[in-house]
Amino acid sequence: MRRPTRAEPTPSIVTLGEMAALFDDAGLTMLEVSCNCCDRRGRVSIACLLAEHGRALPGPLLRRILAADCPRMIAGRVPDVCGVHSPQMARLPSPPR
């Protein structure tokens, strides 16, 4: 993997706190969760996530927590990996940096 040069920005990771602020600005209280690979879907309270995991939780770790009971999350082969995501995130503006 090539490392970014000084001129290239490094990718940033959105935290649960940043996600919560975006959802609050949009008037949303629930995080929709679904999977690209199976029929699993649901909703989770943003307030409950914040209370349980805190504002500093990185988005990728939240993804693993939300799909912890999914057999695909621990798959050893790339084609079998869980496709959990939040469809709402694509419709929200990026957090300010």
Image (spheres, rainbow, N blue to C red):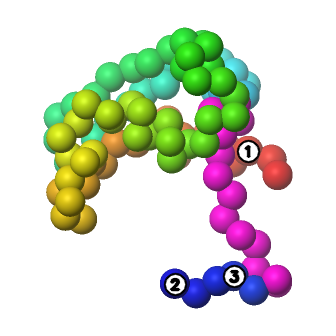
Task: State the image coordinates of residue 15 (x, y, percent, origin top left).
Answer: 66, 40
Give the residue at mark 3: 4
Task: State the image coordinates of residue 54 (x, y, percent, origin top left).
Answer: 66, 24
Occupied quadrant, residue 43? top left
Which is nearer the N-term, disc 3 or disc 1? 3
Which is nearer the N-term, disc 1 or disc 2? 2
Residue 11 is inside the magenta segment: yes
Which of 7/62 is in front? 62
Which of 64/21 is in front? 64
Q: How many angstroms separate mark 3 from mark 1 (CA)?
A: 21 Å
Q: Which mark is residue 27?
A: none
**Above or below, comparing residue 84 to residue 19 in the picture:** below
**Residue at image location 32% in from the left, 34% down from the top:** 68
Magenta highlight range: 6-18
Q: Is residue 29 among what the camera can see?
A: no
Q: Main secondary structure of the magenta part?
A: loop
**Mark 1, mark 2: which one is toward the viewer?**
2
Occupied quadrant, residue 84? top left
Identity, as a three-letter code, of the amino acid under mark 1: Pro
**Above or below, comparing residue 68 to residue 36 in the picture:** above
Q: Is residue 14 among what the camera can see?
A: yes
Give the residue at mark 2: 1
Identity, as a three-letter code, of the amino acid under mark 3: Pro
Q: Do labels 3 and 1 touch, CB within 8 Å?
A: no
The answer to whether residue 52 is left or right of residue 76 is right
**Residue at image location 71% in from the left, 70% down from the top:** 10
**Residue at image location 25% in from the left, 54% down from the top:** 81
Give the residue at mark 1: 95
The answer to whether residue 20 is left or right of residue 30 is right
Label 2 secondary element: loop
Task: State the image coordinates of residue 67 (x, y, percent, origin top left).
Answer: 33, 35
Identity, as a three-letter code, of the amino acid under mark 2: Met
